[in-house]
Every structure is written in C-alpha cells, then in structure tokens.
Amino acid sequence: MQAEPIALFTEAWKQMTDTLPSPRNADGDGISTRFADAPNLFFNLWFQNRPAAAEADFRSILRAGKAAAASWHQPSGGIVRADWAPANWEAILGEEGLAVAIPMLGMEAAAIAPPPRAPAELEIRLVADDPAAMDAAMLNAHAYAMPEEQFACCGGMHFWPAGSMAFVGYVGGKPVATAAARPVGGTIYIAMVATEPAEQGQGYAATVMRHAMAEARKAMGELPLTLHATEGGQATYAKMGFAPGPATPLVVPVG
C-alpha cells in the first residue's frame, strides 16, 4: 500500500468532523484526535500517529488516547496500526483496559477491476439535497445496527462539502445501498459504504461503489483509490482490485 493508512484516516476524519458541531481536532506526539459533539463513536476517535515498537512507548500512546477520550463528553474509541506496535499488542490492549471492537485494514487500488457479474439493477442518485443525505446516513445506521439518531448528524448536505460526493442506490424508490468518495491525501478515499441489511447479498453496494469510484475519477482524476475495510467488506473490495495494507483496528474501552 503506497498511501499511509493512518494519515488517510486522520485526514478523512478531519474532513468529516469539521462538518459536525464543535470539532476538536489536534495532532500531537503519539496521537491525533478527531472529535465532534455528535453522539456517534465513529466521529469521536483518537489515532496512533507514529510507530511505537517498544512496549513502554506503545502503552504511553494508549494511555494518551484513553486520557483524550476521558476528557470528551461523547463516546470515543481509537485506531491503532498493528505493524507500528509490539508483537503482543493485543495483550497490551487488554492490560490497558482496551479491546478490538472492529478489525479493519487499509486497502488501495490503482485501477478498478472489471465486475465479475452484471451490475445490480437499481437507480443510483447523486446525494444533492438533505433528504438524500439522510438516506445515506440511515443506511449506515442500519448496516452497523446502530440507533438512527447516532447517524442523524451526517444526514444533511453540510456533511458533503464541495469536492466530496456521495451516492444512494434505490429500488422501487426505497434506498438500499450507498457509497461516497472524498479527495484525501492525493487519493480518492471511499467511505460510508453500506447496504440495508435486508437487501444484502444482491450486489447493490458493489454496484453503487463502482459508480462512485467511476464518477470520482471523472471529477478528481485518475488517482489511486483507498479505503479502510472491515472484515465483512474485504473480499468484495479485493474483487474490485483493492490490495490489503496494514491492519488498523478500532479499539474501545472494555466494559
């Protein structure tokens, strides 16, 4: 992976939190914070921002992240980079009162691989107004099995400033899948990919994501494509031409 995944994460999350109430973004030695006054853990994260191969150094970064989260009034988590940490990093997490909540890794593609099957039949619309932005937000809430009010903060055009673009796929007027693209770190960063749970397995998200990537390249140029993938999405992204990079798991306090 040519792009550094933590730098992508922190830049992408700054773009997003800057659109939300009371953003608190800071970069220090060891951690970066990307917090917003929104009741969604995904928009309140600290990030390990440099290597820490020594156990004591890694522990100090985890403790700095925990302290930053404790000083904020919204639920918060953190992102670590596994190959920047000691080999026993997961055991150290546990000793520091943290655990992996969502395994993730960075992925990158130089080109979009041809689809293995015909695109799903659906109407794809550019998010251009608040109702469509809310459709994209609610699809993410449903996909992550989170309360809708936690994603309402990104359900408006304020969340999609000039330069970014999001798309929603509809079947019979019902929103079923979404994907978005932002210019981040000299790449086209793909995010907010989600499918309505009852509609999974029909290729809707892949079709919308391929459309988003193609439209983004028309607007932003033939830049590398990057994203952070959960375990559930990695196989789909690999079929599109994305190669895996370093692990960047989301960690949260135990209990």
Image (tube, helix red, strand yellow):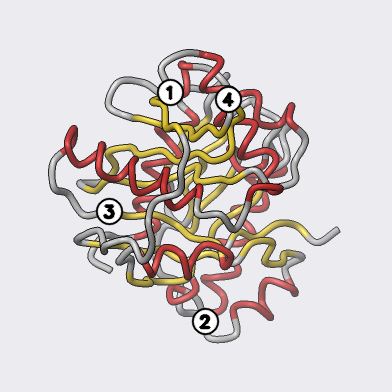
Q: Name the residue at the bottom extreme.
A: 87
How would you rate the neighbour count of disc 3 (Cα within 10 Å): few for under 14, some for 14-19, many for 20 or more?
many
Residue wearing tag 1? 127
User: Viewer-nearest of labels 1 and 2?
Assistant: 1
Residue wearing tag 4? 173
Q: Residue at x 33, y 66 (%)?
A: 242
Task: Give the SS element for disc 2.
Answer: loop
Which residue type does callout 2 highlight? Pro
How would you rate the neighbour count of disc 2 (Cα within 10 Å): few for under 14, some for 14-19, many for 20 or more?
some
- Kindly report the distance in space between the C-alpha atoms of the residues bearing marks 2 and 4: 50 Å
Which residue type does callout 3 highlight? Leu
- Kindly report the distance in space between the C-alpha atoms of the residues bearing marks 1 and 4: 14 Å
Task: Give the SS element for disc 3.
Answer: strand
Which residue type does callout 4 highlight? Gly
Q: Tell me if 253 is positioned left or right of 119 in this view.
A: right
Residue wearing tag 3? 225
Considering only order in the chain, which callout, 3 or 2, is on the residue closer to the N terminus?
2
Residue 220 falls in image quadrant: top left
Q: Name the image quarter holding the N terminus.
A: bottom left
Considering only order in the chain, which callout, 3 or 4, is on the residue closer to the N terminus?
4
State the residue in front, 26 or 234: 234
Residue wearing tag 2? 86
Residues at marks 1 and 3 touching, judged by CB atoms closer than 8 Å: no
- Kindly report the distance in space between the C-alpha atoms of the residues bearing marks 1 and 2: 43 Å
- Kindly report the distance in space between the C-alpha atoms of the residues bearing marks 4 and 3: 30 Å
User: Viewer-nearest of labels 4 and 3?
Assistant: 4
